[in-house]
Image (cartoon, rainbow, N blue to C red):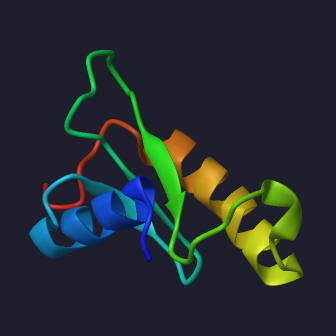
Amino acid sequence: DSCLLCDYLKKELQEDQRILFTNPSFVALVPFWAVWPFETIILPRRHVSSITTLTATETADLAKSFMETDSNSIYLKSE
């Protein structure tokens, strides 16, 4: 049992080329299909069907992901 975004995240973590930021709950990356400057996606490390099911820790980590991605969106991790 898997979903498209969970499978995509697993692949991106293995390749480790477009990762912008990670924390214990989320990964921010530039998707391979990006067409706009600064286009990013933030994906949860665990399957989450709704934002309302996030734990308090995950909610805090999501907020940190927004802030970190915004401040570093022009740099890729490998640079």
x and y percentages locating residue 42 in the rendered image: 51, 51
Q: Say which of 47 and 26 sits in front.
A: 47
Residue drawn at (56%, 77%) of the image: 46
Q: Residue furthest front?
A: 1
Give the left or right position of residue 5, taking residue 15 as reference: right
Q: Nearer the viewer, residue 39 or 7?
A: 7
The residue located at (16%, 74%) in the rendering is 14
Location of residue 7 by image quarter:
bottom left
Q: Is residue 39 left or right of residue 23?
A: left
**Percent position of residue 78, x then y:** 14, 61
Quarter holding the C terminus? bottom left
Q: Is residue 65 left or right of residue 35?
A: right
Quadrant of residue 77 within the rendered picture? bottom left
> In the image, residue 13 lies at what x, y percent?
25, 71
What residue lies at 16% left-to-right and 67% top-to-bottom?
Answer: 16
Q: Could you tell me which quadrant the N terminus lies in?
A: bottom left
Is 34 placed above or below 27 here?
A: above
- Give the answer, above or below, for where 71 lies relative to 57: above
- Relative to 64, say whether 46 is above or below: below
Q: How many marks?
A: 0
Identified at 88% across, 60% down, the residue is 52
Q: Position of residue 5 (x, y in %)?
A: 42, 55
